[in-house]
Image: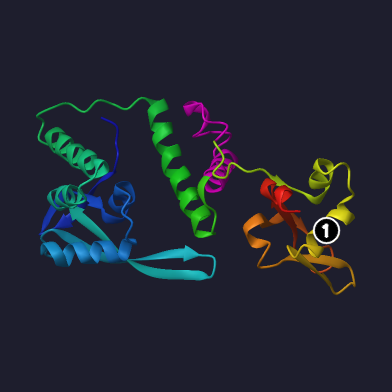
Amino acid sequence: MNELIEIKKANINDENVNAVDARELHEFLGSKQDYSTWIKSRIEQYGFVECVDFISFHKTVERERGAATRIEYYLTIDMAKELAMVERNDKGKEARQYFIHMEKIAKGEIKKIKTPQKSKQIIENDKIFRAYLRSAKAMGLKGNEAVLSAEYALKRTCDGQSMLEPLNKIHLISDNQEKYLTPTEIGNFLGGLSPIKINDLLESKGYQQSYRDTKNKKQWRITEKGHPYAVLLDTGKRNKTDGTPVQQIKWKESILSVI
């Protein structure tokens, strides 16, 4: 059985016992509660006792805005099994069976089978990918955009390693089945109209509004009427003068039916 969650050693109840990092367990179980709320509520709800069922300690972690201190928990295997069981989902069942299996190994009832190197790499990639996926979602990315961002970050970090390619999922089904169009592409659909005429048409129909930037250059903003049909994207480019992101409005194909 592959190592789903790392088994650590911790001094609990004056014994050096096998233990589990509560943060890793929470991540594996996929709980929708934030970590701090989850562990504190479980301890209170099920009457777990510190220094008997778990230990807590402060850990300093480095962040972009400086170091921060957070509370960590190491749990006995029995507590970890109970927490897995009360999740009442497939992940909880899988974790509980894993802990039972690891206990049998510790007692010598069964032999531990070494995980092949390739499998270890897959497990490590999975952990890194999940971490990047959480970061992507924290930045507001959703669905395929979040998944592809995590995949890109994994490849950059791990010398081209991929989570999607072994699953034959290089091309994901779009969350939105409508294609987004530029004014140039809309113009092509409408018989070759120029982007300038398309922008003017969108403004005359009330879907966007023009304004002048600090350089007196004409720009566009989406109106309330236009929001169901448009999306504002960061292009990845930056203004040469002030370094602000360059943004672009794209329109859903459904805009063609209303203009």
Q: Which residues are magenta?
A: 144-172
Which residue is more in the foreground, 123 or 204?
204
Let me know if residue 156 is in the magenta part.
yes
Q: Seen in the image, is 138 located left or right of residue 91?
A: right
Residue at the disc numbered 1? 201
Residue drawn at 27 percent across, 42 percent down: 91
Residue 134's place in the image compared with 125, above or below, is: below
Residue drawn at 40 percent across, 27 percent down: 117
Residue 224's place in the image compared with 173, above or below, is: below
Q: Seen in the image, is 70 located left or right of residue 198?
A: left
Could you tell me if residue 50 is visible in this image? no
Q: Amino acid at mark 1?
A: Leu
Q: Residue furthest front?
A: 258
Return the x and y of residue 67 as percentages of the image width and height: 47, 69
Q: How many marks?
A: 1
In the rendered image, which quarter is residue 35 located in? Answer: bottom left
**Label 1: how many residues lie within 10 Å, few (<14), some (14-19) or many (20+)?**
some
Return the x and y of residue 130 as percentages of the image width and height: 44, 46
Q: Seen in the image, is 198 located left or right of residue 256?
A: right
Residue drawn at 83 percent across, 58 percent down: 201
Could you tell me if residue 195 is visible in this image? yes
Which residue is more in the foreground, 193 or 146?
193
SS class, disc 1: helix
Let me know if residue 214 is in the magenta part.
no
Query: Which scheme is used to colour this image of the protein?
Result: rainbow
In the rendered image, which quarter is residue 188 located in? Answer: top right
Residue 201's place in the image compared with 167, above or below, is: below
Q: Residue furthest bottom?
A: 214
Return the x and y of residue 169 as percentages of the image width and height: 52, 30
Return the x and y of residue 1 as percentages of the image width and height: 25, 29
Q: Seen in the image, is 241 located left or right of residue 47?
A: right
